[in-house]
Image: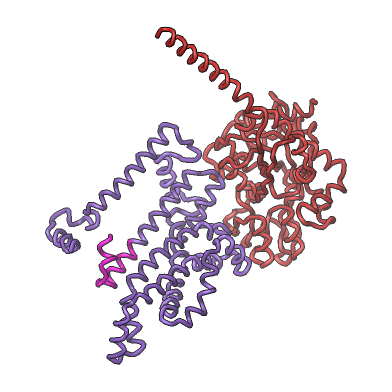
Chain colours: A purple, B red
Amino acid sequence: MKMNKDKTKVNKTTGILRLIPSFMRKRSFGYSMLTVDVLFILWIVLTSTGIADELFLPGPLKVWQAFITVATEGYQGSTLLVHVITSLNRILIAFGIACLIGIPLGILMGASKIARSLLNPLIEFYRPLPPLGLYTLLVMWLGIGEESKLALLFLAALPGLIIATIQAVQNIDPVYLRVARGLGASQKTILFSVYLPAAGPTILAGMRISLGFTYTVLVAAEIVAATAGIGWMIWDAAKFLLSDVVIMGLIVLGLTGVGLDLLMRLIGRILMPWDQRSGSKA
Amino acid sequence: MKNLFQNFSKTILCSLSLLSMSLVSLPKALAEKPKEITIGYLNLVNAQLVTKNLGLVAKEMPGVKINYIKVGGGGDMLRAIAADQVDFGGLGNPPTAIGVTKGLPIKGTMVLNMLDFVEAMVVRTDANIKSFKDLEGKTIAAPFGSTTHYLLLQALKDEGIDPASMKILDLRPADIAAAWARGDIDAAWFWEPNLDKAVKRGGNIFMTSGIMEKRGYPTWDVGVVMNDFAEKYPEYVNKFVKAECDGIDYWIKNPEKTAAIIAEELSLSLDDATRMMKGTEMVPCDKQLTAQYMGTTGKIGGFADTLVKTSKFLVSEKRLPVQLTRTSYERFLDPSYLENVVGK
């Protein structure tokens, strides 16, 4: 109901307001901006009064200068854009492969008890392992190139996807399946017309959580023998106590994460217009 | 009523003066003894292993709990110091230059070791590397921010070779050994005990840190103490330096027993330990007070010059924002503890 009201309001607004995306005009967006503002002011107060040591928390101006320097002159041979693209590339490739493998596997495990029993021990075992512990082994097996980095990111993304997909499939109303079978639908039709549409929203939620988890291991993945990447930049700058570059890198990394998440919600709204959740929460 | 008030104010006065007395005496009581100390030591071959193995620090500080933390390299040690996780640490000259320029609250107290062929560049024998020029197009590893990374870039600069013409990777010593075993890298400049693993798997030594010292680029590790600790427990810094000096003396006087200790500490064969020992130069504590090393209070020695040179290089590499004067590095080096120990 509420959503409909918003929509009518959107349609009525004219002129310059039309250029502002709809979510920015909502009250909840105002509250979110309030949190950001308070944090920002706190940051300025802490740094300008000298309560925080500049070595550990440089002021916003210093971080901004670091941003400008790295964006124009670069950090150790690559500009900020190259670092960001390198990392996003790694994340998206690994996450994409994880989706291609994890979602079908999750559907299989959700639909078939045998498949679930066969694969569960494997996933439940490696899921809680700390990424860095795994990484040592991955480096020994796959070397110091891209393969081990992608493998680590992939392994971080996979379990969340599988578990969310299993949940999604198990929560499908059995009536849908019975009706489809009763009407003589083939397995293929059931997969594409029942399983995927019904489970889609929960799978998307799983994808969003899983992408967040992939982000958490990015720095770890780029510690070993990387020469570019935003995670590597943060790690390398920390070694030289360049805390302005570290904080700038973290902010940029966070913003790309927020951007990707918005993108995924947008895709969700386009692909699954029947789902209320992905739309109304924006 | 008046009496009561007088009594009351007397009590207050009394308790106030007692309180202030105890406040004055409190720091003094604290100054006597730390409950525990944490020593971060670098994973390399030097006399700190002897001091640790023989429990020499504990001997100097009865009743104090001694924690030893092994740290992989200078970059990690810097972070440990910045996070205040150690009381005593050890740093090579590049991390020291970074730490001092960035204003870390540390003091350099003594020379832990001078680096000779214990740090070296190993090249894959079949890669056919005979000169720095041959490194072009190859993959080379070094722990970034460490002494060897600094020497590698310095050597390339002196030879007029662009570092961009090769692939220089940041790997920690243990990862270098693993990557070497897989054949992922053609050359690596790092240190024992992991260096030997690369040499034994089809590598030979091409350049050592000792040769670079003769070219005017000495590298060393300096013992550092956190300023807070040194202010609170100056006597315990003396005790620490004394223990390390005893370890150095033991190293110089008992090479065979030392080799056995190093073999035990690093799980090496006795032959390997003996050879690695020779690659590290230990400086007796009285000699550390000469102009080549720490110098004396009021007349700081060559270590300050090395720090100036190192930071100049790091600034040119854009690893450091500003270049400090020699005076700033002189302030960091504090030979007074050594003087106390040697004078005794």
Above/below status of A260 relative to A275: above
How many numbered badges does the structure rendering display?
A: 0
- What is the chief secondary structure element of the magenta stretch? helix
- Quadrant for the C terminus of chain A in the image: bottom left
Task: Residue A210: say if magenta.
Answer: no
Q: In this view, does A177 lie to the left or right of B29?
A: left
- Residue B97: image x %, image y %? 61, 39
Which residue is located at x 50 percent, y 60 percent?
Answer: A217
Q: Nearer the viewer, residue B104 or A19?
A: B104
Question: In the image shown, does B311 or B263 lie closer to the viewer?
Answer: B263
Q: Which residues lie in the magenta part?
A: A262-282
Can you tell which quarter of the image residue B184 is in? bottom right
User: Would you say A228 lies left or right of A15 here?
Assistant: right
Residue sitting nearer the eye, B154 or A213: A213
Residue B92 in sight: no
Res. A218 visible in picture:
yes
Residue that protrudes farthest toward the top in the picture = B2
Q: In what quadrant of the picture does the N terminus of chain A appear?
A: bottom left
Residue B131 is drawn in which quadrant? bottom right
Q: Residue at x 42, y 47 (%)?
A: A67
Which residue ends up furthest to the bottom in the rendered image?
Answer: A184
In the rendering, at what x and y percent does residue A74 appear?
47, 51
